[in-house]
Image (cartoon, rainbow, N blue to C red):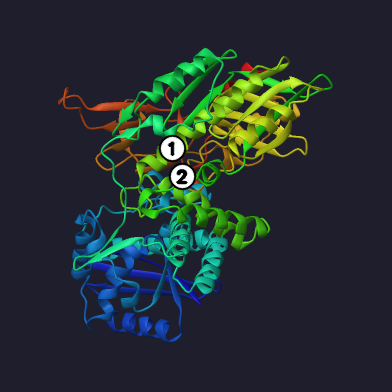
Amino acid sequence: MDIIYDLETYPNVFIISACVADAPITWAFEVSDWRDDCEEIRNWLMWMKESQCRMVGFNNLGFDYPILHLFTQRAKVTAKECYDKAQAIFQDETRFGHLVYPSDRYVEQIDLYKIHHFDNKARATGLKVLEFNMRLDNVSDLPFPPGTVLTQDQMRVLKEYNAHDVLATQAFYVKSLEKIAFREQLTREHDRDFMNASDVKIGKDIFQQELERAGVQCYEYSREGRRPRQTRRQAIRLADCIPSFVEFQHPEFRRVRDWLSTQVISETKGVFNDLTATVGGLHFVFGTGGIHASVENRYFESDDQHHIVDIDVTSLYPSIAIEQGYYPEHLGPTFVHVYRRLREQRVSYKKGTAQNAMLKLALNGVYGASGDQFSIFYDPLFTMKITIGGQMMIAMLVERLASIDGVQIIQCNTDGVSIWKRAHLDIDPVLTEWEALTRLHLERVMYQKMAIRDVNSYLAVDIDGKVKRIGAYEYDLDWNQNHSALVVPKVAEKVIVQGLPIRDTIMNWPDRMDFMGRVKVTRGHRLVGVVDGQDHTLENTQRYYVSKGGVQLVKVMPPLAKTPTKVRRVGVESGWTVCCCNDIRDAALPIDYEYYIKEVEKLCLSLM
């Protein structure tokens, strides 16, 4: 049985709200100036332990459970002790000092925050943002500042808020069931606890497990504990990262290769951001993250005379390592054999199976981990061999295709190219020659239509009607992304793909939640709504829509060092008024459709 829970701590109030994940059973506990549920909390924990329940929370491993664990250690715990524990957790920059190890946990824990990798700085996402993304009716924030000594009336409000957050966590739990089931299966099959592991960690752990089975030592052990074996380098010659078969006829690509061959670097991020080449009328940008080029503000449609073809390398980064025999130096050539075996195993499982998904994670996680200074895969030369080698190989593919009369390169990205070619032109001999040279495999997809705003934003429809959405046109988003104003990309797709009129489609759009935007300010900043020149403080995470009437939304930020007396004010949706509606019942003002029409026009009119 899974029990969803959340807790709140104030100097004189500690409360817990919980529910059974799939039944209408709830609990509420309190330790405060007015009530002491310590014994009830201990009995509840004991019942869950004996019943082999799992407690499910959001950041519960880092925050909630270390506080709750206090109740397993002594009979009486005060609200102040819970609050002090919370403050100690917040002040611990590493947060590791307060973690309770799995073997010491009284009740098994599942942390949705960990599973979705929100503990990664680039993916950091709070429950309030998830409530917005899940389109809950109420996304309001904590009603009282942390550290407030609460009255009984305030505590009753806090309990309502706490119960609401449990329902929000329960909703996110339901949306996470597939991920949880996947981890349950891996845990059974590998006899290793994957329940709170992110996808990235699962991939790295599976690969590490396979290396160790093959006899590769991944850690060094001493009295101080274990540390990952790694290859650290003072400098990297980029000439060592370019495969010997890389040759160019075009002087621009040849210039890029020759320049790279002379470079010696000590840092792998952002070391050559201005490296470019102009080939076939396109401006190619090279970087440590990949190669990119694209036409801009263009629309293409396949017909009897011309076809759009997208050509991608299958599993580019793993395939480069496997076929070129690249490996982190400290792991040796066995690394390549393990990599190849995992790739072969993945092909043997159907797409959609847990085994296929697990092996995909194992294959794709290694490249990123090779640049992680805490990983067993760390070797920056291995990283650069893959990324530099990959760019050179893709550039070779571009050069060969661009040299064919009747082929236009319309886009190039890290792992492939999109072309506009004469319908009956056979490009297979060129592709086959490139595949033989690089030992990589190319996948071809025919597109019906392709609308390209720029290299980062485009829309493509394949011959089966499946739509690929990138950048500004994307609306099927990850949970950590901003789900604001999804009516804009949704209507833009209708306009581009089906030819629907912008204004009528916007004004008759049926889902008002698609008009909602979200803004969030960080600690030390304020969000205000301005009415008649007066600031009205808003919650730090605010839902809104552009409306007729309402307030002007402004971020108020501390002064910069060079202007210490000048508070900074930055408008949100400048020039428009908005209706703030963290409680959806406050969404009473008319939508200003003109704003949304103009946003759709930005994605469509330049292409039509």
Which of the 4 quarters of the picture holds residue 485? top right
Residue 399 percent across, percent down from the top left: 60, 21
Nearest to the observer: residue 409 or residue 256: 256
Task: Point out which mark residue 385 bears.
Answer: 1
Nearest to the observer: residue 306 or residue 96: 306
Question: 10 Å neighbourhood of mark 1: few (<14), some, or many (≥20)?
Answer: many
> Up-down: is 482 above or below 309?
below
Nearest to the observer: residue 168 or residue 140: 168
Residue lying farthest front? 244
| Residue denoted by label 2 | 326
Question: 10 Å neighbourhood of mark 2: few (<14), some, or many (≥20)?
Answer: many
The residue depicted at 29 percent of the width and 84 percent of the height is 39
For the residues bearing labels 2 and 1, Cβ distance under 8 angstroms: yes
The residue depicted at 67 percent of the width and 31 percent of the height is 433
Residue 447 percent across, percent down from the top left: 73, 31
Residue lying farthest right? 304
The residue depicted at 49 percent of the width and 31 percent of the height is 244
Distance from the alpha carbon under mark 2 to that under mark 1: 8 Å
The quadrant of the rendering that contains the C terminus is top right
Task: Report whether 229 appears left or right of 80.
Answer: right
Tell me if residue 104 can be seen. yes
First reached walking from the N terminus: tag 2 or tag 1: 2
Task: Report whether 391 appears left or right of 65.
Answer: right
Q: Secondary structure at mark 2?
A: loop
Amino acid type of the residue that numbered disc 1 sits on in the rendered structure: Lys
Nearest to the observer: residue 138 or residue 62: 62
